[in-house]
Amino acid sequence: MATPIDVVIMAAGKGTRMKSKLPKVLHRLGGRALLAHVTDCVARLSAHQAVVITGHGAIEVEAACDRMTGAAADLSLKFARQEPQLGTGHAVQQALPLLADEGVTLVLSGDVPLTQAATLKALLEQCDGQRLALLTLSMADPTGYGRIVRAGPEASAQVRAIVEHKDASEAQRAIQEIYSGIMAVPTRLLRGWLSRLDNRNAQNEYYLTDIVKFAVEDGVAVVAHQILDAAQVAGVNSPVQLAELERVYQLRRATDLMEQGVRLADPARFDVRGLLSCGQDVEIDVNCIFEGQVSLGDGVRIGANCVIANASIAAGAVIHPFTHIDGEKLGVSVGEGALIGPFARLRPGAQLGAEVHIGNFVEVKNSTLAKGAKANHLAYLGDATVGERVNYGAGSITANYDGANKHRTVIEADVHIGSNCVLVAPVTIGAGGTVGGGSTITKDTPPGALNVARGKQISLPNWSRPQKKKA
């Protein structure tokens, strides 16, 4: 649209039914705040700005907005406080000083996270800078929603009013077409209509929906853009509703991926809490969670019950069940054909080359493992650089922390580390060398050497254990 768009997002409510200290719009769906989903959608509209109406928990909500990432990061956000909260009309009145008369105001709710940008664009087209456009939906059970009152029974009849549920007559409550809480209105008209609001109603509040009757009185066309997808206008008012909407969100993410060719063992047991991109022939078993930014290359297989966050997994890699990968800010990368798990843990900065094997109960942090390196059992690699074809024994660790600072361990190519070894950093194990089982290595070792550092074994024949004294 050529007409500038200002978006007003309602985010002042307390959300009493959530029974939480956290402001309602900051509760999370798909790993992100409800409000973040709304601002992401707004960012796709090329809006001039978004004005967030805050009230309950205003400081916390405004701070969360300042930290938003994704599409919303580039959105111009402003804030208007609604204190006290006297209704939806009163909320929009607080934003008026920030709105330009020559534009269109789009009103959204911060607790309605699944509205699609295409739907809002269609609504704005209906408005066209001249009309009051309402987003509506027909519901079998419209209890609690404002009803769309038309001039006649036909679906095409002129919209005459919105009647809130508490103020509706029995006949009006039988109407199934409801107002979603989303509207687009020319700002110059909105300003005048808001000045005419009063609170003579069952809730003693200033209803934004009353501007419909003012538009009718002024001869301004009121149009309804009716959609069929109830989830797009579903709000969150309780933990039950949040959980229900979470499953809708996740099923839609699962469907999108399956349509791209991803094989999900069970779409109902799958969660994406961020961005997940997949190549061809990716297989994902049940109860897997993906957080932050995760990419899976062609032919990657993810076993059951894995949690993977902020990681890049290259083609042909297999992540066996119960593996936990979390790259946080540093990220984790897994090379082509690598085998990880089961019960492995990859922490920030783990960079694994092609065909690396990380087995059960092995933890890797801030370490680089070159092609073909293996740590198959019960081991820890922290702050280490590991060369090609290294075999790292069960129970071995890099002692990388001296109580104040971290130090690096270098294990050069073709080294064999025996079981139950401690490599005290900073230390370098020379190429082709071997460290005997049970050794504690504190000094650099030369290439090709066998290195053993442990106490001498002593055997005492015919030794008897101490006996308990009799009472």
Image (cartoon, rainbow, N blue to C red):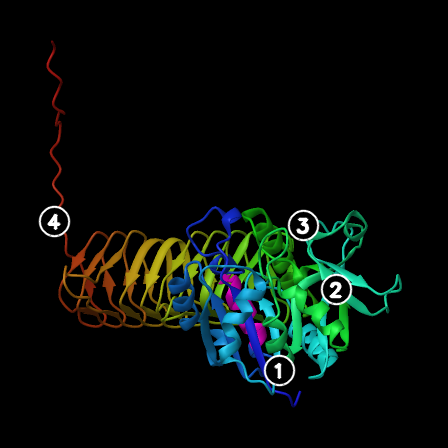
Tell me which secondary structure the magenta stretch mostly adopts.
Answer: helix
Sequence order check, earlier mark of 1 and 3? 3
Left or right: 312, with 449 as reference point: right
Q: Report, in whole angstroms, how far the alpha carbon at label 1 lies from the one at label 3.
A: 30 Å
Q: Which residue is mark 3?
A: 166
Mark 3 packing: few (<14 Cα in 10 Å), some, or many (20+)?
A: some
Q: Quadrant of the C terminus?
A: top left
Sequence order check, earlier mark of 3 and 4? 3
**Which residue range is magenta in the image?**
32-42
Q: Is residue 103 magenta?
A: no
User: Element at badge 1?
Assistant: helix
Question: Can residue 334 be seen here?
Answer: no
Sequence order check, earlier mark of 4 and 2? 2
Q: Which residue is mark 1?
A: 188
Q: Report, in whole angstroms, how far the alpha carbon at label 4 lies from the one at label 1.
A: 87 Å
Q: Quadrant of the N terminus?
A: bottom right
Left or right: 190, with 403 as reference point: right
Question: Can residue 291 be seen here?
Answer: yes
- Of tags 4 and 1, the one toward the viewer is 1
Give the residue type that dot 1 points to.
Arg
Sequence order check, earlier mark of 4 and 1? 1
Q: Report, in whole angstroms, how far the alpha carbon at label 3 lies from the one at label 2.
A: 15 Å
Do residues under tags 4 and 1 come within 8 Å of each other at their CB atoms? no
Q: Which residue is mark 2?
A: 161
Give the residue type that dot 3 points to.
Lys
Q: Report, in whole angstroms, how far the alpha carbon at label 4 lies from the one at label 2.
A: 90 Å
* Rendered location of residue 290, percent (x, y): 51, 61
